[in-house]
Amino acid sequence: MHIVVCIKQVPDSAQIRVHPVTNTIMRQGVPTIVNPYDLFAIEEALRLRDAHGGSVTLVSMGPPNAEDTLRKALAFGADRAVLLTDRYFAGSDTLATSFALASAIHKIGATYGAPDIVFTGKQTIDGDTAQVGPGIAKRLGLLQLTYVSRIVSVDPDAGLIEVERRAEGGIQQLRTRLPCLITMLEGSNAIRRGTMADALKAARAQVVIWTAAEAGIADLTRCGLRGSPTVVKRVFAPGARSDAARMIEPAPTARDSADALIDAIFSAQPALEADIAAAQAAL
Amino acid sequence: MTETSQPNAPKAAPAGGSRATMKKELPERFKSYRHVWVFIEIERGQVHPVSFELLGEGRKLADKLGVELAAVVLGPPGGVEEAVAECFAYGADLAYLIADPLLANYRNEPFSRGLTSLVDTYQPEILLLGATNLGRDLAGSVATTLLTGLTADCTELDVDADASLAATRPTFGGSLLCTIYTLNYRPQMATVRPRVMPMPERQHKPIGRVVTHPLGLVEDDIVTKILGFLPDRDTNKANLAYADIVVAGGLGLGAAENFQLIKALAHALGGDYGCSRPVVQKGWMPAERQIGQTGKTIRPKLYIAAGISGAIQHRVGVEGADLIVAINTDRSAPIFDFAHVGIVADAVRLLPALTDAVTRRFSPHTRDRLAG
Ligand SMILES: Cc1cc2nc3c(=O)[nH]c(=O)nc-3n(C[C@H](O)[C@H](O)[C@H](O)COP(=O)(O)OP(=O)(O)OC[C@H]3O[C@@H](n4cnc5c(N)ncnc54)[C@H](O)[C@@H]3O)c2cc1C
């Protein structure tokens, strides 16, 4: 089986700081990581390869320094990594991103064999939209299985896959045909510790780097800002509420502070106090 | 450089607005696109509440634009009539209906086919969907097929002076919102998470115009088969998103065991409890307890936030609360910008005292004395 996993380099959100005056994100010096949701996709791909044979290709679109992130991800044991990097991709929204990644996966198919499964994480921690996976599936004409919590079985010879997917109020059990695109739910597995051999291999590995042209993209108007139907017109800090918070003066004892706060709450919401009393009386 | 979400406008936009897409130059073929649509999500016969919330929001947009509001209903015959009637009660002027047994349970192929075909035929200018697993699965495919813009997880929707949809959502990084437009493509698509918009009043309205549309598929056309459905076991467990009272803790509580204090106060008030995202990341609370943009959106009557700074991603999940109470040691924490009542105090010390105060206030003894 050939399995492709789409991953993204994201800033480590725990370390993001916002400039106190300008309110802009201070990206400088913020360490980058593999989007944490993607780790579940990588692990699932490796498990399938280990069980059925074949190879795992990682692909990412990002700035040149995403090469390091791909190398880190390779250390879990994937077979190769492709970085799609070009200034024409700058400012891509989800539609333009799915176009670029779908083009790259097409080229990966032509170079290393057609993929049986394409994985993505559920969403990224920075953009958070969960739209790129479905976008890639649609563009490549792959069947789409989102929010997959468990891969029940894969039969590469018959070209069939059975999965469980998280739906509202329960788990949907589905069977579909390969090739397909899966977005993997978080917590569905635990990423392995790469072996020493994998780490050494990753350190020496050559990440394949493609420009838009090298990925076979002829129409650059479909990339980056120009290929993005959405435009961000305004970025702003949310204002404070017009009426300032009523601040409760702390009392010398926690007990008195608590009583003052509870008084303030129920004088603002008298109906709530009656509701609680009624609910408690009914117990 | 690249964002899989939305471009980082301030950095990316060249000065002078030289970017062609920043200007509205709607191509001729889109000029006939009119009216506001809401996709109605039906799960095992029940309309998801987010669809009604979106009808409420869609009503406002349609009125501003002077156009109609349509509910888009896809489902099996016999399972959709009631849903259609409900949509009228929540403000729809008309309904587009595809009733087909193949739509009995959600699958991407028939639903994206059906919705895309409706859009191509009847050409709405705005299409709203709930940002649920179903809505996101469907919206991503449909927007890609139509090659139009889709803005995820909006917290505010409006139409601006030139009648474009202004979709506002938090940006990455903790303290900013951005307003996103799909100027030159149609429909303008957006998803909104459950509970972000208020539930509109239900009206007694007679059933309105229903436009039926064929799906045009047979089961053999659909590759993906549903083998079964395993309902979640404890369905009657308290639903945080719908609780009237919520008490939540943040990193400021300092340790996993201090979340007992949150649970105790919630219990004393007869409410539910939650937390901020880093608390989940630390493993102090399970993911289903997370409140905010990437967790649950709540609209309780009372929200008490202890040791939570009030970052924008948290704020957008709680702003619908009637009364927000903040407990924080730092007077300059952003949460005091949008709380209604605040106290600068150590939450670890104050929380047990609050539980005690509530218990005393509602003890049978006190109640009797008050009554007597
Ligand atoms: C894409 C994205 C999505 C996100 N989604 C969410 C989301 O859904 N929900 C969410 O909550 N966050 C989300 N975040 C994270 C968010 O930006 C903040 O980092 C997070 O909300 C901060 O959590 P906190 O307030 O608990 O911690 P902090 O910001 O560290 O605040 C802790 C607060 O506790 C106070 N404190 C310290 N000690 C005490 C004490 N003893 N008593 C009282 N107060 C004390 C401090 O003064 C401080 O204000 C998201 C971030 C990103 C980038």
Image: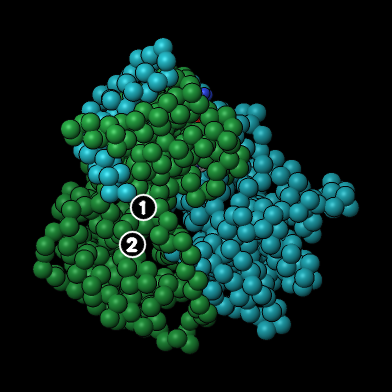
Left or right position of B102 against A179: left
Q: Is there CB contact under 8 Å for labels 2 and 1?
A: yes
Residue drawn 63% across the image and 47% down it: A36
Q: Chain of mark 1?
A: B
Residue drawn 61% across the image and 66% down it: A150
Mark 1 CB within 8 Å of ligand 1: no
Q: Amino acid at mark 2?
A: His
Q: Which residue is mark 2?
A: B48
- How far across and how far down the image is residue B262, in percent? 46, 36
Depth check: give the residue in front, B334 or B245.
B245
Depth check: give the residue in front, B50 or B359.
B359
Image height of B131 relative to B305, above or below = below
Image height of B361 relative to B343, above or below = below
- How far across and how far down the image is residue B297, in percent? 39, 46
Q: Which tint is chain B?
A: green
| Number of marks in the rendered image | 2
Q: Chain of mark 2?
A: B
Q: CA distance from mark 2 to mark 1?
A: 9 Å
Q: Which residue is mark 1?
A: B194
Q: Which tint is chain A?
A: cyan
Q: Amino acid at mark 1?
A: Pro
Image height of B299 relative to A51, above or below = above
- Judging from the image, what secondary structure is the residue with disc 2 in? loop
